[in-house]
Image (spheres, rainbow, N blue to C red):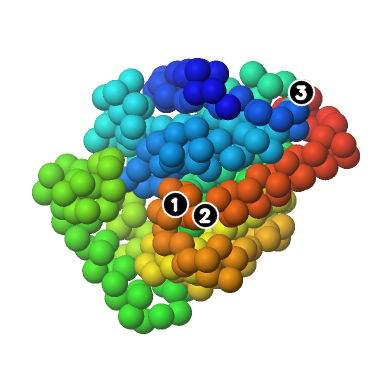
Amino acid sequence: MSLAARTSFEVSTADAIRLRVEHIPASAPAVGAMWCGHAMMANRKSLDRPRGGGLASVLARHGLEVYLADLRGHGESAITAPEVRDSWSYDDVVALDLPALTSFIRMRHPGLPVAGLGHSLAGHCALAWLGRCEALGADPPLDALVTFGANIWLREMEPSRIRWARKRATMEVFGAAARALGRIPARALGFGSDDVSLAFALDLHRFVSTSRWFSHDGFDYLRGLEHIRTPVLAVLGSGDELLCHPVAGRHFHDALPCCTTREFGPPQVGFAPGHMELTTDLRSAPIWHEAGRWVAATLLRTGLYNGATTARR
């Protein structure tokens, strides 16, 4: 697909923050549309590397209208909304960014079902959002979701005492850096390309230190997972040693009623993908194609058997 066919947009959230979004048109007959969200300390570029031949471009080949998004405080969204660069919170992504992206895509493609793909941060934020919506009796806001390397660091999800000690130590470093500098300096710490705000860092520290995944208004995101009816595909990398170890990732997704979990390693792709390699290493292309086939098939079933999905939203 020609890179010239791509279009950039600014999507406004309910609190008037402008998110930068890039549309990759489907390169096969469209069966659905989807947004792709990145990991913490990353941006949308990590989801199509190399540009034109990465994960997002592969998804477009499966008949999906793909929208790459820079979440608030990341990538070009940090430029369009500098006022929130150092102040955005976890709940802001859950309750403001993801609903705005989904509504924007439904508006642009009113006849198509809509899915999401979230790597790490965007993945568990999407699950938090879906769980809250469905626990409160709302229609599922997405027709399908794929998570790549997504989990929350909670003690009950981590059976290894050694890995849990590493997670606690890592979070203490993050918390100390954020309090001292007003943000987590991603590049300086060697963890990524995009800094993380103090408010968000304190949210993560709260989750780990209390081993409770709660919103600021008291909603239990973990308990919300059991209410999710949206089909979910969970993708895990066998080489992800800390951020989303496959054991912790499986524990995290076990709470979902409608989840298919796939772990990829040397038998499937010839190497053990780490956390970022799931989305940035070309050797992971078979994983990307499997995700694209799953989303396309799931959305096609939605279109065939639940044609009123988009209308009732």
Q: Quick one: 27 or 226, which is closer to the camera?
A: 27
Distance in Å between CA atoms under marks 3 and 2? 31 Å
Q: Quick one: 167 or 62, which is closer to the camera?
A: 62
Q: Name the residue tied to disc 3.
A: 111
Relative side of 303 to 209, left or right: right
- Percent from the top left, x then y, of residue 290? 65, 52
The N terminus is located in which quarter? Answer: top right
On residue 284, the disc is: 2
Asked if residue 216 shows in the view, the reply is no
Q: Is mark 1 on a helix, strand or loop?
A: loop
Q: In this view, does 20 lie above or below 156?
A: above
Q: Contact (CB < 8 A) between labels 3 and 2? A: no
Q: Which residue lies at the image location 68% right of the left edge and 21% below the top edge?
A: 109
Distance in Å between CA atoms under marks 3 and 1? 33 Å
Q: Which residue lies at the image location 52% right of the left edge and 66% below the top edge?
A: 270
Q: Which residue lies at the image location 21% right of the left edge and 46% below the top edge?
A: 187
Q: Is mark 2 on a helix, strand or loop?
A: helix
Instruction: Tell me which amino acid carries mark 1.
Output: Asp
Distance in Å between CA atoms under marks 2 and 1? 6 Å
Residue 292: image quadrant is: top right
- Percent from the top left, x then y, of residue 145? 63, 46
Q: How many labels does the image show?
A: 3
Instruction: Tell me which amino acid carries mark 3.
Output: Gly
Q: Could you tell which of marks 3 and 2 lies nearer the N-terminus?
A: 3
Q: What element carries label 3?
A: loop
Q: Is residue 109 above or below residue 253?
A: above
Q: Contact (CB < 8 A) between labels 2 and 1? A: yes
Q: Name the residue tied to disc 1.
A: 281
